[in-house]
Each structure stands twice: as structure tokens, then as C-alpha cells.
Image: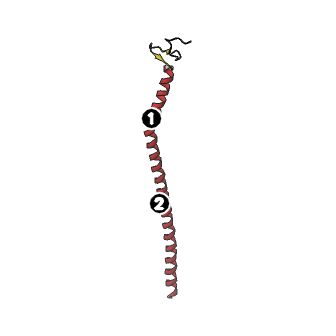
């Protein structure tokens, strides 16, 4: 039969401090440090994502501003050409 003093649990390992533990303390420390690292990176990752979104928005904004300025320059050149054509035609037609 079974021993009445035995609970049926496997024997526990003893760690360096004299207490009983089922895991090596180096393993639990490594898992804890990894969890703390992941938790600590959350706010930093969120801030970086916000900065990336803002920089991409500004890039599109500046690109649109440069494109708009180029369109205005084309309109100004076309209008100047048209005005000079009309001015020269009016000046030479009166003679």
C-alpha cells in the first residue's frame, strides 16, 4: 500500500537559500526580467509609433506644399506668356 506520511507529491528541490522551489532561481529571474523588459517597452513603443505617424503626416504635408507651389509656378508662367502675347499683339497692331 502507500505510506501514510507521504502526500504523493514529487520531492521538492532545495535552492541556495535553503527554501524549497520547483524551479531554478536563475530561470525565474530570467523570466521576470523578460517580463519587466516587455512591460517597460510598451510606452516607448507607443511613443515611437506616434512620432512615426506624425513624421509621415508632415512628409505628406510638405510634399503637397511643394507640388502646389510647382503648380502655381506653371500657372504664373502660362499667364505671363499669355499677357506678353496680348501686349505685343496690341502694340504691333496699332502701327
Residues at circles 1 and 2 in contact by the CB criterion of under 8 Å: no
Outermost residue, front side: 1
Disc number for residue 6? none
**Quick check: 91 above or below 10?**
below
Q: Residue at x 48, y 53 (%)?
A: 59
Residue 60, given in percent of the width and then of the height, sits at 49, 56
Earlier in the chain: of badge 1 and badge 2, it is 1
Residue 21, given in percent of the width and then of the height, sits at 48, 18
Q: Which is more toward the observer, 23 or 64?
A: 23
Count of numbered labels shown in the rendering: 2
Q: Residues within 10 Å of mark 2 (few under 14, many from 20)?
A: few
Q: Which circle, 1 or 2, is nearer the viewer?
A: 1
Q: Residue at x 46, y 57 (%)?
A: 61
Disc number for residue 65? 2
Q: Which is more toward the observer, 93 or 57?
A: 57
Q: On the rendered image, what quadrant is the N terminus found in?
A: top right
Residue 25, given in percent of the width and then of the height, sits at 48, 20
Q: Which residue is mark 1?
A: 39
Amino acid at each position: 500500500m502507500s505510506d501514510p506520511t507521504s502526500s504523493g507529491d514529487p520531492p521538492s528541490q532545495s535552492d541556495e537559500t535553503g527554501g524549497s522551489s520547483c524551479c531554478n532561481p536563475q530561470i525565474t529571474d530570467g523570466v521576470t526580467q523578460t517580463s519587466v523588459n516587455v512591460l517597460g517597452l510598451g510606452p516607448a513603443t507607443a511613443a515611437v509609433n506616434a512620432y512615426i505617424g506624425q513624421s509621415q503626416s508632415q512628409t505628406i504635408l510638405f510634399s503637397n506644399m511643394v507640388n502646389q507651389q510647382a503648380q502655381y509656378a506653371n500657372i504664373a508662367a502660362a499667364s505671363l506668356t499669355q499677357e506678353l502675347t496680348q501686349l505685343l499683339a496690341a502694340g504691333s497692331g496699332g502701327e
